[in-house]
Image: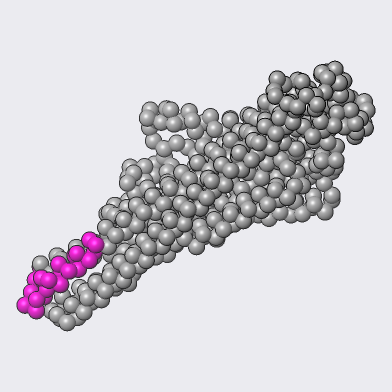
Amino acid sequence: MQRVNRGRAGNVAARDRAFRARGPKLERAGVWCTMRGEMLASADPPIAPAPPLLRWVAAAITAAIVAIGAVCLLDGARRLERPFAGFFIGPNRVVLSVVRPGWSLAHAARVSSAQLIAIDGRPIEDPLEIEQHVATLAPGTPILYRFRKDADVFTEAIAVKRFERGDYLGLYVIYFAAGLCFATAGLWARWRAERTPAATAFFIFCQTAALLLMTNADLYGPYRFAAVYFTAQCLTPAALLYFAASYPAAIGYRSRARRMTLAATAGSAIALALALNLARSDPGLFGPLSNAVFLLLANAGLLYLARLLIGVLSTESPAWRASLRFALAAVLLPALVPEALFVIYPAIEGPIPSVILIGPLAAFPLLTVAALRQIRGAPELGSTASIRLRLSLLFLGVVETAFLIGVAMLWLNNSRERLLDDYALNRRQQARVERFLTGLLPTLIGTPDAASNLAEIDALVQTSAERQLVSTATVGIAQHDFAMTRGAVNRLGEHYREEERRLNDRRAWMGRLAVNLVLDLIVLGIVQAVGFMIAVNRWLIRPIAQLAAGTDVFPAHWDPKLRIPRGQVVAAASIVSPKY
């Protein structure tokens, strides 16, 4: 049956009432109310300009985000022509995978993603200490760093570099420019576009993405907006899902299910942001959680792409097809560059410029704005989902559940691997302490063997407290003070045993979390399977069965008393669509 053409003359409600009068059995079958799911006029989302107050609120939000980006840009400008370490570390002292041509990190690949624990033998706990230490040195001066990666602790000599204009443009300006494209595009959607759910959702997504891009440079220091960055990182996937639920049509507009789903998505994103900020000082928890957030962002992008493809297959309007083509280009064009680099990466020598990776992201907001411009004045597709769309969304729900299970398992495996690395390092530390105490005798306190064993302990020191105990033992050896040396090393051993107890508590917590997570996913899968069967029966099987029971259109075994002649069916259907 053809879809309702609401552009034709006549009143939809009047035709609907006439059709109900002629075909009572078709009314129960649900044929009169748009077999393909176009909504009646009363369900349309409002199409009107945004109120002036909302426009100015949107402008204020955009201005605040741009101001934060400008602060980060000024922080980067202060680095110009000044010495720096040759690499950047995050708030948790983990070396960031940011490499520019000529940087020392390009020749020391194992340093990437390692945690910096000491500079010239002095443990550090504040990431700003490295900048203070390097500021007094001339470019080219080598510094001996101690890193920890997985269960290994190693040292690496890296020369001081000078932060040049090319570095500033490639690391600060490019991120600010991409964020500015998102911020201004979102403001246009709120200021100039019609007041639709798609415009609102696009504004929210653009502002979260702009905040994420503009505060990215703050991860290089001084970490003023680190919490803002991690929060935006978690909110961006939720905002993209909100946009996918609002464009090209607002799914379930004004329905309770839509409000509950969006509220659950936003609440989950906020909870994830809180967890990420609380765990950012512990690389063992932060690393796997951050990787899971990036996977969720990629998943949201794939769901948005699937939503656009479903929209292309479901509409015949030229304006909407043109809009969806721009929207598809906005998603696919930024993805082509990373895909091409993945193919040719083995042939690339040296680091990839960030402008090639970040620059194409600006195409997304600009092309999406063009997509929204194409539908200005066009009739809305509607928010009532067709049977095809509903079944497609159910299928995507199954895929989404499988993806979330994969993300959860990946996070658990990564966290467990990090925990095993912590165990391995802790046992090495305790073994060296025990070996030192076993061979420590009053007559051997000043021998080279004692100093050598203590140096082995010192090689695995990670914190200032541990370093102070080792320094005390070193003084005791120099003064031939057996009691001082043994007491300091005993306290160090107790410190490592306390660390082991903390790791045991974390392992127990992760075990409980894994059990609860698996149970939740199993319940989710069962509920989803039951919901899928109920939905298919309600949306597809029951209407067809009722239609077969009331007409002779479908060959089925029905009660002959309920049969309606074919001519009456065709006449009734022609009221809905003259093309029938």
Please give the name of the residue rendered at 47% of the width and 57% of the height, measured from the top-left corner.
Answer: 516
Q: Where does residue 252 sit, x and y in percent of width and height?
A: 73, 42
Q: Using residue 146 as the reference point, say whether residue 283 is left or right of it.
A: right
In the rendered image, which quarter contains the N terminus?
Answer: top right
Above or below — where is 563 with respect to 194? above
Residue nearer the viewer, 563 or 23: 563
Please give the name of the residue rendered at 47% of the width and 37% of the height, measured from the top-left corner.
Answer: 353
Above or below — where is 571 with respect to 377? above
Q: Where does residue 392 sit, x and y in percent of width and height?
A: 63, 33
Q: Using residue 451 as the reference point, say whether residue 121 is left or right of it.
A: right
Segment colored magenta:
427-448
Q: Where does residue 83 sit, x and y in percent of width and height?
A: 42, 54
Q: Is residue 79 visible?
A: no
Residue nearer the viewer, 311 or 516: 516
Q: Using residue 415 as the reference point, say whether residue 558 is left or right of it.
A: right
Q: Is residue 532 visible?
A: yes
Where residue 133 sits, quadrant-wise, is: bottom left
Is 443 one of the magenta-colored residues?
yes
> What's the magenta bit mostly, secondary-structure-wise?
helix
Residue nearer the viewer, 250 or 285: 250
Above or below — where is 414 with respect to 443? above
